[in-house]
Image: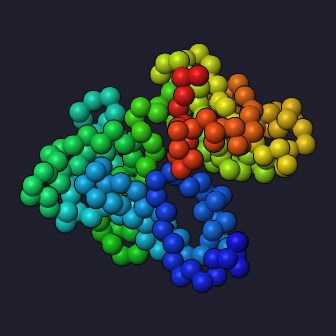
Amino acid sequence: MRKALAPVQFASFAGEPLGICMQKRFRDEWDTRLAMWTSAGDTGTSWECREHNGYHLWEDTVVVEGLAPDSRDAAAEGEVGELVVTDIDNLVAPLIRYRAEDLVRLDRGMCGCGRTHVRQWPIGRAGDLTLVQGKSVMPLEIWPVVEQFDETRSALFQVIRPQREVDRLRIRVGYAPERTRNLDDLSQRLAAAVQSAVGVLPELEFIEEQEIIARASSAAKIPRIMKA
């Protein structure tokens, strides 16, 4: 991959989240300049800078707010809130205080790059939050845990739930059979790591990576929340 990407001067990525380990592989192992970007609540895009510390929202085009997820109150600085945006450069169909259903952390301090526009850190979709015995769990909390193991480094996983509030944290995980010697051993290691990260011991179901991709409607996006 390093040789194949050698002619590439710069790469950007958006859509399906890219895990921390894969970002590191792009930048360090493959020596590729990579910038991540995401949505600005349907009012444009939000980009990383060279600091790779949050996504800049362009406040000359959009007014940005963060609301506490279960109320209309403003979320405290640095706390998780729902992204609310007002489009100020779309004269045809502006969005006014549009609730994006994206959970984010906002920071209005100066970035290391010198920009003063607000930055956001996406946490996930509001509908992706799962309550396990009162404990909130987001797929993006599970992501870095799954991808740290060589057998599951592609981070193909799904939270299986019949409804938002459940008694058990069930996770379906795709594994690479060519890199897996002992599924029982992997299950013990991964379950312990997930429990350490989110505070809940999961019930794990393992299927091969190609099968979890085949079950998805699109290979580009794997649904992270499934009813079955």
Give how far across and how far down residue 188 sits, in percent.
82, 33
Q: Quadrant of residue 189?
A: top right
Residue 201 visible in this rendered orientation of the protein:
no
Q: Quadrant of residue 181?
A: top right
Left or right of 158, for residue 35 = left
Left or right of 186, for residue 129 = left
> Which residue is painted at 59% across and 54% down in the image?
19
| Quadrant of the image containing the N terminus | bottom right
Left or right of 102, for residue 89 = left
> Which residue is painted at 37% across and 42% down in the image?
102
> Which residue is painted at 53% across and 18% down in the image?
162
User: How many circles with numbers are drawn on the protein?
Assistant: 0
| Quadrant of the image containing the C terminus | top right
69 in relation to 19, above or below: above
Q: Quadrant of residue 70?
A: top left
Give how far across and how far down residue 24 sits, in percent.
64, 65
Residue 71 visible in this rendered orientation of the protein:
yes
41 in relation to 89, above or below: above
Give how far across and how far down residue 67 sits, in percent.
28, 39
Give how far across and how far down residue 183 sits, in percent.
85, 35
155 in relation to 215, above or below: below
Left or right of 117, for residue 47 = right
> Which residue is painted at 46% across and 45% down in the image?
123
Furthest residue toward right: 181
Furthest residue toward top: 167
Query: What scheme was used to colour the molecule?
Result: rainbow
